[in-house]
Image (spheres, rainbow, N blue to C red):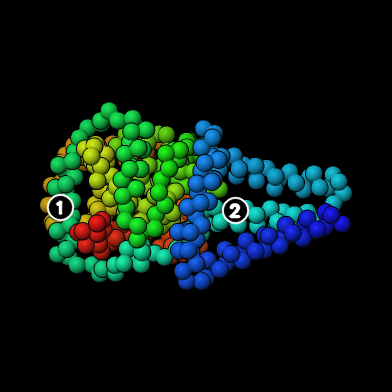
Amino acid sequence: MKYKRVKYIRWAVLLLLLAGVGMCAKMPGAGEWYAREVYPYVSVMLSGVASVVPFSLCEVTVLGFVLSLIALPFWMRKHQAPWGKICVREVEILLWVYVWFYWAWGMNYFRDDFFTRSETERVAYEEVRFRQFIGQFVDSLNAAYIQDASLSEKEIQSGIKAIYRQVPERFGLTLPKDFQHPKRSLVNGLYSKVGVLGYMGPFFDESHVNHELLPVQYPFTYAHELSHLLGVSNEAEANFWAYQVCVRSENKFVRYCGYFGLLPYIYRDAYRMLDKADFKEWANRIRPDILRELREKEVYWNERYSPLMGAVQDALYDWYLKGNHIPSGKKNYGEVVGMILSLPENWWQ
């Protein structure tokens, strides 16, 4: 009788949590309420637990769930449980994983979009403004160029966190904590093969960075992943914050990394928007040292990349993003330029 009571309570809690996920997904404002009023406390608690161990607690948790789903049918059949009961238990485990993912971090996908929170409107493409922006961008990129600086990862992390603490409150980002440090994946080589430079571990609110990153990639990638930990789910917005935070650094190398991290998106948009002659003229303004570093980066990662595994990962992640209120899927990464152009010059104040 006691076991049945516990089972009913367990399922009642599970159904309530599922209802909460559905409410945040469908009810306007509910996702933003979660991001501002619930997530800051949840993230501090979970990332605080994760900070105790040097490895990725999220990856260990996922592995534990997978092994449980595989082993449970054998264990229950050994104890003569019917297949119907086994299926119900497997479904229950999957539902707990689902609610853990969303209540721990995933409901940030349901918050108000960047333009609503920034109190701006998405601007239509204007050729004059775009040309002005990419011209200024190249000037700033060239001026910031510096070869590898002697900064430790801890110094980079500390400086970037300090700038994130200055982000205007209307954007609704949580404040980074000193104990929140990026983890290294237990299967880092696999992420390199599929072109993943970092990712957000949702079950314990852990950011992860690929430990094969080139020095010029580390500040931008770390700032991108940290923004996810601070409540940003949109990949374009994560690129936006990585750029904005890095270029505001007092350290010239970190500033250069901010411009360098945004360069591929600017380069792609310029190639699409300008005619061939204008694009060539613009591209020729970029310092040869920077273009060489960009090519070396591409060669470096191509040597580690598996086309087959990368294609599978791209398809799965595209499907995942589209299923979480990001209709453009993986193309969302490149929408960062539109965000930059939509804001007035004094938006940070």
Which numbered disc, 1 or 2, marks the residue closer to the eye?
A: 2
Residue 245 vs 304, above or below: the answer is below
Q: Quadrant of residue 256?
A: top left
Locate residue 209, reporting x and y percent: 42, 39
- Crowdedness of circle 2 by 10 Å Cα count: few (<14), some, many (20+)? some
Secondary-structure class at tag 1: helix
Observer able to see residue 275: no
Locate residue 335, reporting x and y percent: 32, 59
Label number found at residue 100: 2
Give whichever of 326, 290 is nearer the camera.
326
Which residue is the extreme one toward the top? 150
Q: Is residue 8 left or right of residue 16?
A: right
**What residue is at 75 percent from the left and 46 percent from the top?**
72
Q: Quadrant of the C terminus?
A: bottom left
**What residue is at 50 percent from the left and 49 percent from the top?**
43
**What residue is at 85 percent from the left and 51 percent from the top?**
81
- Crowdedness of circle 1 by 10 Å Cα count: few (<14), some, many (20+)? few
Locate residue 305, reporting x and y percent: 42, 40
Q: Which residue is mark 1?
A: 136
Observer able to see residue 50: yes
Give whichever of 250, 199 is nearer the camera.
250
Q: Amino acid at mark 1?
A: Gln
Q: Is residue 261 left or right of residue 33?
A: left
